[in-house]
Image: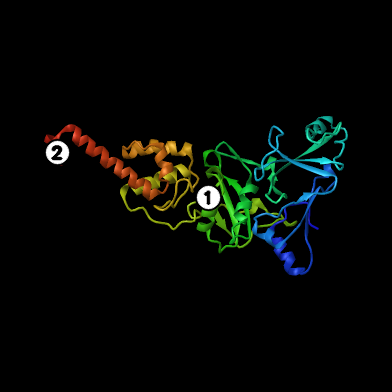
Amino acid sequence: LAGGDVLSPPHVARAAELLPGSRLVNGYGPTEATTYTTCHLVRPEDLDGGAIPIGRALANARHYVLDGEMRPVPVGAPGELYVGGDGVARGYPGRPGLTAEKFVPDPFGGEPGGRLYRTGDRVRWRAGGVLEFLGRIDQQVKVRGFRVEPGEIEAVLRAHPSVNDAAVVLRGDGELRRLVAYVTPAAVDRAALADHAAGLLPEFMLPAAVVALDALPLTPNGKVDRRALPEPDFAAAAAVEFLPPETPTEGVLAGLWEELLGMDGVGAGHSFLALGGHSLLAMRLAAEVLARLDVELPLRAVFETPRLRDLAARIDRMRDEALAALLEELGDDLSPVVA
């Protein structure tokens, strides 16, 4: 019987290897609901889902996944877990304010005086009717104005067949705050993993770098030691082959990206978005392109052609088109002088 923290697939696989023929049950529940409220009998297919479910309700317990207005969310959508039933505690002794905040009236049970406990845990219903734990609401991070749950990204990464385990943290300050994913094993195909994540996550939740490690650092009690995760080299961790800039425009763009993104080693194959670029930095990039290359670069161009080599080619075409339009406006008689 496992409980008390997130149950990782690698630990489940290790337990199955060392204890053949045994059954492993994943239990979940806060102290305020008398310890356990759900359980899940772990099956081999759970190891391919990215996260071990916390399961279904025990007898006399009820669970609701609600949004910020206490409205039920659809299957697959994340929300806060509320627990009801016989196990819900009366409150916190001597702390009426906290009790009122965490133990709220139950609008669903139909029982006079019924209450729900707000767990503060972010979960979602799976299609099979089991709950999946995504992380703590108070552990959400804010990236470019969006609230992001690292556990949701970690679950997507763990679902890739080449990944054993994953941890996602926020690195940097101000405009350069970027999500970084750490995955095991070190031999993982980072380019394939980036494509996998891009197909399942919105752009603002995609890690700016993927760092592959032999193993995630752990604390003495077996939890991921996030403070011990190494600082990433964003350009090297962008999962693309380094291509040196070849044209003058590529060279200028590479220098601009390094200045704006606070990194070294930007090549022609790198993507502005994959390196952590966003709309605010794209606006600054457009202003610098105008100042240094005398080309008015539309903001949408950065998102339509985020790869440095492609964006440089687009800028060169825009410059050529502008020159051709100028020659046409001035007339044929000035063409020999310009030539």
Label located before the other in sequence (1 or 2): 1
Give me the residue at 78% from left, 51% from top: 4
Residue bearing mark 1: 198
Q: Position of residue 269 (x, y in %)?
A: 41, 53
The colouring scheme, among rainbow, by chain, secondary structure or one colour, is: rainbow
Q: Position of residue 20 (x, y in %)?
A: 76, 69
User: Taking 51 as reference, is 120 above or below it?
Assistant: above
Residue bearing mark 2: 335
Q: Is residue 96 left or right of residue 333?
A: right
User: Taking 81 as reference, is 241 above or below it?
Assistant: below
Q: Amino acid at mark 2?
A: Ser
Give me the residue at 55% from left, 38% from top: 144
Q: Which quadrant of the structure image shows residue 9?
A: bottom right
Say which quadrant the C terminus sits in.
top left
Q: Is residue 111 left or right of residue 156?
A: right
Q: Position of residue 30 (x, y in %)?
A: 80, 45
Q: Which quadrant of the structure image shows residue 2?
A: bottom right
Q: Amino acid at mark 1?
A: Ala
